[in-house]
Image (tube, rainbow, N blue to C red):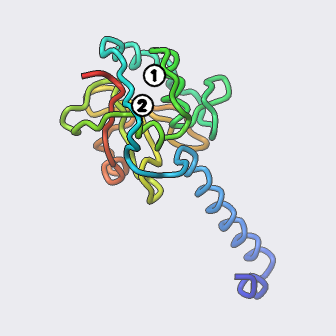
Amino acid sequence: MMQRLFGLDAGARWAALSRWWLMAGLAAVLAGCAGPSGPQHTGQAFIQIDAAQRTEVVMTALSLLDTKYRYGSARPAGGLDCSGLVKYVFATATRTTLPHNTDQIAQLSRSVPRRDLQPGDLVFFNTLGQPNSHMGIYLGDGRFINAPSTGGQVRVDSLDNPYYRKHFQSVGTLFGS
């Protein structure tokens, strides 16, 4: 790469380096929710939250709409990333402590068929070529709330959105049956 860069004029070299740094930064940002991936479940006990708290989870999540995205944060005042959003919502609505890592949260959830999705369940996506690299909270009617990326904010998206449809991975629940 360096030989190719030095053969360019200063403006072209600056543009090429800027694109490279932008792509490297974007990759790091998109990895924000990922964390190390591992097996879907490691034998840990599933979390069993009272299903009567589903509405409180959804209402708490919706109260965070438009909160800015911030990689590594689980505090609304500073911003939220995807697993930080889920961690904060469940701590606030159900007093359940979750890790700040999508893969670890996936391991604590019980797998559910997509057709059985209910409000408050978790939806997981493979957005970085690795399992559980993004997540959100299902709201109902094919919609979920998530903190998607740097420069963005907490928003509602559709599971039918071509991007999310392509990257959809699984559904998990933290609620008892």
Position of residue 30 measured from the top left corner of the image (x, y, whole percent)? 55, 51
Residue 19, by quadrant, is: bottom right
Q: Is residue 71 left or right of residue 102?
A: right
Query: Which residue sits furthest right?
Result: 10
| Numbered tag placed on residue 145 in the rendering | 2
For the C terminus, give its image quadrant: top left
Q: Which residue is mark 1?
A: 61
Q: CA distance from mark 2 to mark 1?
A: 7 Å
Q: Nearer the viewer, residue 57 or 67?
A: 57
Position of residue 91 measured from the top left corner of the image (x, y, whole percent)? 51, 19
Q: Is residue 157 left or right of residue 101?
A: left
Task: Please report the residue visible at 29 percent of the width from the left and 21 percent of the height from the top.
Answer: 176
For the residue labelled by badge 1, is the local secondary structure a helix, a strand or a loop? helix
Position of residue 68 measured from the top left corner of the image (x, y, whole percent)? 60, 32
Residue 9, by quadrant, is: bottom right
| Numbered tag placed on residue 123 in the rendering | none
Q: Are marks 2 and 1 in contact (CB under 8 Å)?
A: yes
- Pointer 1 local density, CA inside 10 Å: few below 14, some 14–19, many at least 20: many
Task: Please report the residue visible at 75 percent of the width from the left and 76 percent of the height from the top.
Answer: 13
Q: How many marks?
A: 2
Task: Please report the residue visible at 60 percent of the width from the left and 50 percent of the height from the top.
Answer: 29
Position of residue 144 measured from the top left corner of the image (x, y, whole percent)? 36, 32
For the residue labelled by badge 2, is the local secondary structure a helix, a strand or a loop? strand
Residue 51, by quadrant, is: top left
Q: Nearer the viewer, residue 104 or 118?
A: 104
Task: Please report the residue visible at 38 percent of the width from the left and 40 percent of the height from the top.
Answer: 43
Q: Amino acid at mark 2?
A: Ile
Q: Is residue 97 left or right of residue 52?
A: right
Q: Amino acid at mark 1?
A: Ala
Specify which label sits upstream in the sequence, 2 or 1. 1
